[in-house]
Amino acid sequence: MMLSILGTQIMWYVTRSSGFIALLLLTMTVVLGVSSAQKVKVGKIPRVYFAELHRSIALFALVLLAIHIFTAVVDPFTKLGWTTAFDPFGRTYRPLYLGIGVTAFDLLLAILVTSLLRDRLKQRTWKKLHFLSYVIWVFAVVHGLGTGTDSHYSFALAIYGVCLLAVVISVWVRILDSETKTSLLRFSAYALTLFAPFLLVLWTLSGPAKSSWSKRFVPNVSSSHVKSVTSPSEREAGE
């Protein structure tokens, strides 16, 4: 039993840590992508280096996400199963936020595939597809906050806050530096980048930031099973 409990806790820690690191890498990818669109230069470093860094971080994020998904699926507490990739919203463990995370992963795969086929796509088409990066990032944040049993902890909120601030600032600088001359379009862009984070913060404070959030989504399992496999954070939430 002790080995079973220890194994489950390790799975939980690996799942959460890989998810956090993947979110940080995804945030770096978005910020680098925005900087690349602005043709930002750092000293005499060629822009191609930033493009390579952007691509490498995106691939590394994908590897971390693969680890995140694998450990979440094999964790006996969640009981997700390998069919989750095809039917994420039909699970018993936080189906809405789980489905949002799976959708984000599928969209990320689509973007990586189109990046590999960039030479065969029109530049305008490729750019439009890459706007999905913002959607992926938002989905990843909502997924992490919604499914995380530790979302109410200060360290977790700090990570999400840093990621949010980094993306918002980079987007604002991008809008300011854009060639858009229409004031209405620029105002609409600023309004959207203010309204969306406001809703995200409001939802976080009213839900995931509260310690009671974890209790609302504990799967319907027997008491003996909960005692033996509950993750450290989930166990604390149930006390």
Image: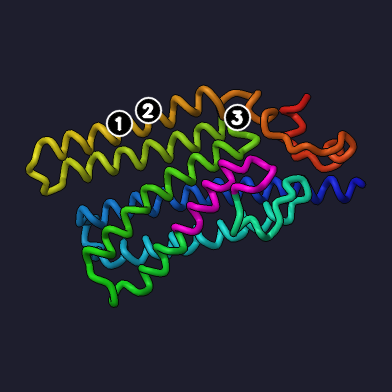
Amino acid, disc 2: Phe
Q: Which residues are magenta?
A: 89-107
149 or 81: nearer the viewer? 81
Sequence-wise first label, 3 or 1: 3
| Residue 53 percent coordinates (x, y) | 37, 62
Q: Is residue 225 above or below residue 86?
A: above
- What's the distance in space between the residues labelled 1 and 2, CA to CA? 6 Å
> What SS does tag 3 mark?
loop
Quarter of the figure with residue 216: top right
> What SS does tag 2 mark?
helix
- Residue occupying the point 46% across, 63% down: 109
- Determine which of the numbered discs, if any, sits on residue 194 in the image: 1
Q: Is residue 22 above or below residue 227?
A: below
| Residue 56 percent coordinates (x, y) | 42, 65
> Circles 1 and 2: CB distance less than 8 Å?
yes
- Residue occupying the point 57% across, 41% down: 96
- Determine which of the numbered discs, if any, sits on residue 153 in the image: 3
Left or right? Give the position of 115 relative to 230. Answer: left
Q: Which residue sits furthest right?
A: 1
Q: Is residue 237 magenta?
A: no
Secondary structure mainly formed by the magenta segment: helix
150 or 75: nearer the viewer? 75
Amino acid, disc 3: Tyr
Q: Which residue sits furthest left?
A: 181
Q: Nearer the viewer, mark 2 or mark 3?
A: 2
- What's the distance in space between the residues labelled 2 and 3, CA to CA? 20 Å
Q: Nearer the viewer, mark 3 or mark 1?
A: 1
At label 3, counting other C-alpha atoms closer than 10 Å, the crowd grade (few under 14, some 14-19, many 20 or more) is some
